[in-house]
Image (tube, rainbow, N blue to C red):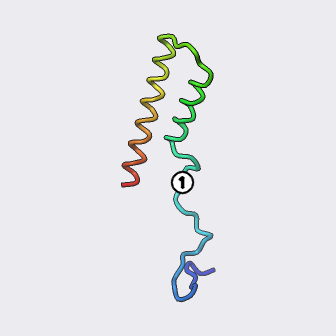
Amino acid sequence: MEDRLSHRGRILEDMSTPGPSVPTRPAADHANAAIRAFVAGRTSWSAADLAELDRLRTEWRRALREEITRAA
């Protein structure tokens, strides 16, 4: 099969060639989901809980920065 296909005068790459791997869900979405799951239903917070929330938020902010940098 040819590597390129013509469609209405345009050259298209063969669709059977695998492209770059793209995560189905960005890391920031995963981190956000982890935060939401962690805080769901909580009514009180221990020092350990707050430390874990801070860790999760730090991971979320890092993931957002990476996604913004990658998009720029």
Other-residue count near label 1 (Cα within 10 Å), few / some / many at <14 / 14–19 / ≥20: few
Q: Quadrant of residue 54?
A: top left
Q: Residue at x 62, y 22 (%)?
A: 41
- Under circle 1, the secondary element is loop
The kind of residue on which mark 1 rests is Val
Q: Is residue 67 left or right of residue 3?
A: left
In the image, residue 50 lies at what x, y percent? 47, 17
- In the displayed structure, 64 sits above or below 72; it is above
Q: If the image is split into quadrants, where does the N terminus sit?
A: bottom right
Of 17 and 72, the residue lying toward us: 72
**Which residue in the rendered view is the most extreme toward the top?**
46
Residue at (56, 78) in percent of width and height: 3
Which of the two residues, 72 or 23, is positioned nearer the viewer here? 72
Instruction: Identify which residue is drawn at 41% across, 36% down.
Output: 61
Measuring from the top left, give residue 58's x and y in whole percent.
Answer: 42, 30
Q: Is residue 51 left or right of residue 24?
A: left
- Does 35 sit above or below residue 25? above
Residue 37 is left or right of residue 68, and the answer is: right
**Residue 2 lies in quadrant:** bottom right
Q: How many marks?
A: 1
| Residue at left offset 54%, top offset 63% | 19
In the figure, 64 relative to 45: above or below? Answer: below
Of residue 62 and residue 39, the one placed in the foreground of this image is: 39
Q: Which residue is mark 1?
A: 22
Rendered view: 71 above or below 29: below
Q: Where is residue 29 drawn, in percent x and y?
A: 53, 41
**Residue 68's x, y, as percent?**
39, 48
Quarter of the C terminus within the rendering: bottom left
